[in-house]
Image (tube, rainbow, N blue to C red):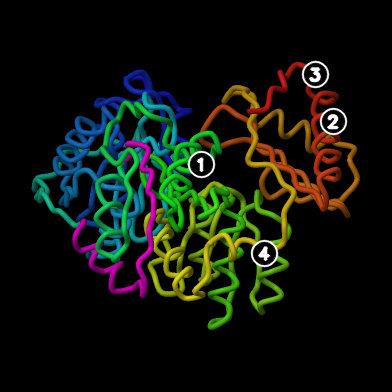
Amino acid sequence: MEITKSIFREYDIRGIYPDEINEAVVDQIAKAISIKCDKENVSEICIGRDGRLSGESLLAVLSKSLSFYGIAVQNIGLVTTPILYFAAKKSKNRSGVMITGSHNPKNYNGIKLVINDKPVSGGEIFDLINQEKDPSSKIGDVKIVDIKDYYISEVTKDIEINKKIKVVIDCGNGAAGCVAPKLYKELGCEVIELYTEVDGNFPNHHPDPGKVENLEELVSKVEETNADLGLAFDGDGDRVGLVTNKGEVVYPDKILMMFARDILSSQKGSIIFDVKCSNVLPEIIKSCGGEPIMSPTGHFHIKNGIKKHNPLLAGEMSGHIFFNDKWYGFDDGHYSGARIIELICKKDMSISSINNDLPMLFSTPELNINVTDDNKFKIIEDFASECSLEGEKITIDGLRINFDNGWGLIRASNTTPKLVLRFEGNTESDLHAIKDMFLNELSRICPDIDINLD
């Protein structure tokens, strides 16, 4: 069977169902995972899936194949990725496999995995696929386990909310619908639900809170119901989007600023953030006595950074936030939402006021240019080597240039056939000038690209 190599990405495994990823491919991936488990002395693994239409059959094959190769399985069923990570943290072998297409279009699916409490790249699994392995003489036990209530009870013990908060939650018909409504009700909130029914067709809007257009209905509902805040989650629940009581969309780097100030007021340590975040974030971290650490984008890199630096907090512009101060250090959208509500109560201020206490930013959201998986890295390589713009150049992930009046970034997406860009200026006119400079330079170096930003 021919397996498409491009589905094995830097962070995880992702492809179109059934052309690139299907039951036969997952059977082979399960064999590779079992070889990795054997190397790490892992005898049992937790598995789960998000709400995609292909998830149920792929999970069934994953369970059967892992068991066939001698690995015991705890099948936790339809869950969010954070609940799978939680189950892995609580299990004896600290290992888990999640069948998820994350925020990709509905015809995608994929795999995120952690073995022995460490993230595993798609590339490492691909390298193991061609290794031979005989079926095990002892078939692994398979147990069906429901861990959602255990997770909810642990979050409610961890979070302190001392007043009635009205929250609108938009699950975008993704897997967060199986946990978020109950979680926030258990925390004592008044919960207004938008699209909490899990439906892999995503009939209302795409479950990606990183795109402002996907938050329009949440903004309207917050304003209409006079809610204290709105929270949105991506397809597998590991990312959060925030709307204030005044209907303002707060970008995740500003959410990280709020948390950095709060956490560093009582503990000192490092905070990790990705290359797409505002320059104001490291300034705030330093002013509060913390150590800022910039990372390449991607949960794989952030998790390895957490292993290395043991920070109090980590996060990405995409909305992945990792709490490591009093939680488990994995990215968790619905827990992050609970921490935002806790912060509102602790400060006794509206989320809009907390946001307004932060410096005003002149920045774009994440912008994309459509290219191909085959040429995206070559485009970045050419741009980085031929770019004539003057400034401090950071090349840990694409090219970020810091200027006196702001910064610009261009990098290749690791999960989609796109270039990712972001710009920030000290003023509105600085922002436009930096953006124009970058795009003009891109047109000069790569004239064949159709520069349509979306």
User: Looking at the image, is mark 4 or mark 1 nearer the viewer?
Assistant: 4
- The alpha-carbon separation of the residues under discs 2 and 4 comes to 32 Å
* Residue most extreme to the bottom: 266
| Magenta-span inclusion, residue 173 | yes
Q: Is residue 236 left or right of residue 262?
A: left
Residue found 41% across the figure and 33% down from its top = 14
Q: Given contact means CB atoms under 8 Å apart, are the residues at marks 3 and 2 in contact?
A: no
Residue beneath disc 4: 358
- The alpha-carbon separation of the residues under discs 4 and 1 comes to 34 Å
Q: Position of residue 281 (x, y in %)?
A: 67, 62
Inspect the image, locate mark 1, and give the three-letter code of the amino acid beneath it. Glu
Residue beneath disc 1: 10
Q: Position of residue 427 (x, y in %)?
A: 83, 50
Q: Secondary structure at mark 1?
A: loop
Q: Give me the disc on residue 441.
A: 2
Residue found 86% across the figure and 39% down from its top = 433
Mark 4 or 1, nearer chain start? 1
Residue 323 lies in quadrant: bottom left
User: Looking at the image, is mark 2 or mark 1 nearer the viewer?
Assistant: 2
Residue found 61% across the figure and 55% down from its top = 253
Q: Secondary structure at mark 2?
A: helix
| Magenta-span inclusion, residue 332 | no
Reply above or below: 132 against 106: below
Q: Is residue 198 left or right of residue 346?
A: left
Q: Which residues are magenta?
A: 148-174
Residue beneath disc 3: 447
Q: How many marks?
A: 4
Q: Position of residue 54 (x, y in %)?
A: 26, 28
Inspect the image, locate mark 2, and give the three-letter code of the amino acid beneath it. Glu
Q: For residue 41, say whether it is visible.
A: no
